[in-house]
Image: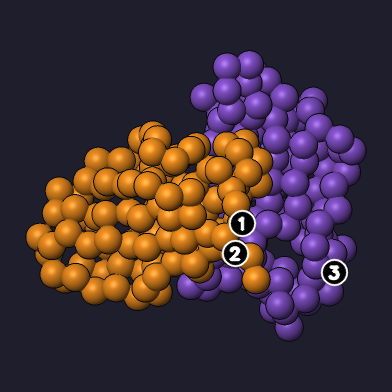
Amino acid sequence: AQSVTQLGSHVSVSEGALVLLRCNYSSSVPPYLFWYVQYPNQGLQLLLKYTSAATLVKGINGFEAEFKKSETSFHLTKPSAHMSDAAEYFCAVSYGIPSGYSTLTFGKGTMLLVSP
Amino acid sequence: DGGITQSPKYLFRKEGQNVTLSCEQNLNHDAMYWYRQDPGQGLRLIYYSQIVNDFQKGDIAEGYSVSREKKESFPLTVTSAQKNPTAFYLCASSIRLNTEAFFGQGTRLTVV
């Protein structure tokens, strides 16, 4: 079964600092990987996705993530945090398998706090 | 505008009553999903459907039921058998199962 681990339920940064949110996945087949953002009382919005093309994926709002197969990681980064980045972030994994396709499995989320 | 519409945004019900949450999409997606979100637990899959008139149980289907009579619609019924129904419910859709999912704005259900 696929799974995702997000290290740190809360991450605090200062405005202008580097944002690093960690995601590790378990896999026996090549994964598809996603990062979503959720603002309070709203649905999830896709930030970026990896589907076996370039290992460095650029997304919206200046975020990017790098797929590292050797580390089974897909960490999310942004060079300079803005106050508007404060939200909860979810990593998700899915697979295309010979007998069908898997649904997305989500991590437990990381709340990003940005201080002035 | 294409998207997913969930209604209502807030819902209050008395314990022991069944309640149905609406989800409609105009993205022409085949797959639709219901997730439950509780603080600190991420998203947990309740039910999903790959095609009209077919649906599968997810990880926490007990106490819930769904139907998929139309491609655009995937309503979720929270029955009285669900022991702890108060939660934030999210509906989503995708082209197929393993592709990116698009989410509605959610329904917050409170059972008193």
Cα–Cα gap, marks 2 and 1: 6 Å
Q: Residues within 10 Å of mark 2 (few under 14, many from 20)?
A: some
Q: What label does residue B3 carry, if any? A: 2
The chain identifier of the residue carrying mark 2 reads B
Question: Residue A86's spot in the image, x, y percent?
Answer: 65, 72
> In the structure shown, which secondary structural element does the residue marked by tag 2 occupy?
loop
**Which one is in front, A5 or B45?**
B45
The chain identifier of the residue carrying mark 3 reads A
Q: Identify the image quadrant of the N terminus of chain B.
A: bottom right
When the figure is inspected, residue B78 is found, relative to residue A6, above or below; the finding is: below
The chain identifier of the residue carrying mark 1 reads B
> In the structure shown, which secondary structural element does the residue marked by tag 3 occupy?
loop
> Which residue occupies 35% across, 55% down?
B75
- Residue A68 shows in this picture: no
> Which residue corresponds to mark 3?
A80
> Which residue corresponds to mark 1?
B27
Q: How many marks?
A: 3
Question: Residue A32's spot in the image, x, y percent?
Answer: 70, 35
Q: Hue of chain B?
A: orange
> Which residue occupies 37% across, 47% down?
B69
Q: Hue of chain A?
A: purple
